[in-house]
Image: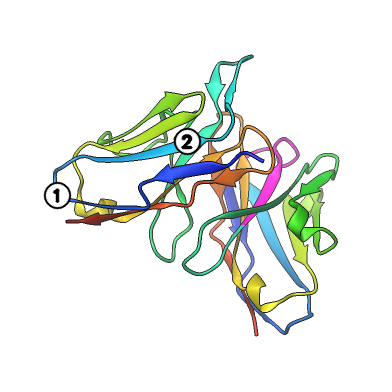
Amino acid sequence: QVQLVQSGAEVKKPGASVKVSCKASGYSFTTFDIHWVRQATGQGLEWMGWMNPNSGHTGHAQRFQGRLTMTRNTSMTTAYMELSSLRSDDTAVYYCTCRYATGAIAWGQGTLVTVS
Amino acid sequence: EIVMTQSPDSLAVSLGEKATINCRSSQNVLYSSNNKNYIVWYQQKPGQPPKLLFYWASTRESGVPDRFSGSGSGTDFTLTISSLQAEDVAVYYCQQHYITPWTFGQGTQVEIK
């Protein structure tokens, strides 16, 4: 079945960048878009952006303009999310997600990014 | 952007009783070409990622107990737990994936009365 496995927790200084990986398995990686969602502690879910793994085309929420980069390595079936110019309010759990053919949405286990 | 509004923000229900969560979208999320509502429901427990309960508003994900049901179309949707169990204590979210940005309801905390 569709499985998304993310990289481990990160601690970063303000102003630094973080890069989170998301390895996909159980389906053809280039078939379905990868979306990134984050959740600050005790808060709701916030959509960040999406990437088409086939073309590399991306789209993102306006608030991340200029700070969010999404890439992929198709041979490794892995998607990457890089967030730059980190601030304390970027401290959150970051998730990769994928809507697949049935209409269901799979989630990675999450990656805690702490900015301090 | 489609705004998703859940009600209530929290509810306390006795064990074995029914819990009902409502979700309203600011725009229609029914895609006419396939007659599907682009709504999913999640359950989230502390320290865990959201767990998919329903997609297409009412299609139950494999393994989800049948005391859970999803309904609605267009702009109004409902998640019902017919007989609340202790393990159902969690935060529940609706989400639209009709258009980007994907947007989520603010969440509903379900507790035992």
Q: Amino acid at mark 2?
A: Arg
Toward which corner of the image does residue B36 lie, by quadrant?
top right
- Residue located beneath label 2 in the image: B24
Boundaries of the magenta span = A26-37
The quadrant in which the C terminus of chain B is found is: bottom left
Compared with residue B96, is residue A93 higher up or lower down, i.e. above or below?
below
Toward which corner of the image does residue A110 lie, by quadrant?
bottom right
> Is residue A33 on the magenta stretch?
yes
The mark that comes first in sequence, 2 or 1, is 1
Q: CA distance from mark 2 to mark 1?
A: 27 Å
Q: Position of residue A34 (x, y in %)?
A: 69, 46
* Type of colouring: rainbow
Residue found 43% across the figure and 66% down from its top: B47
Dot 2, crowdedness within 10 Å: few (<14), some or many (≥20)?
many
Tell me, yes or no, whether dots 2 and 1 are on the same chain.
Answer: yes
Compared with residue A105, is residue A73 higher up or lower down, i.e. above or below?
below
The foreground one among B19 and B7 is B7
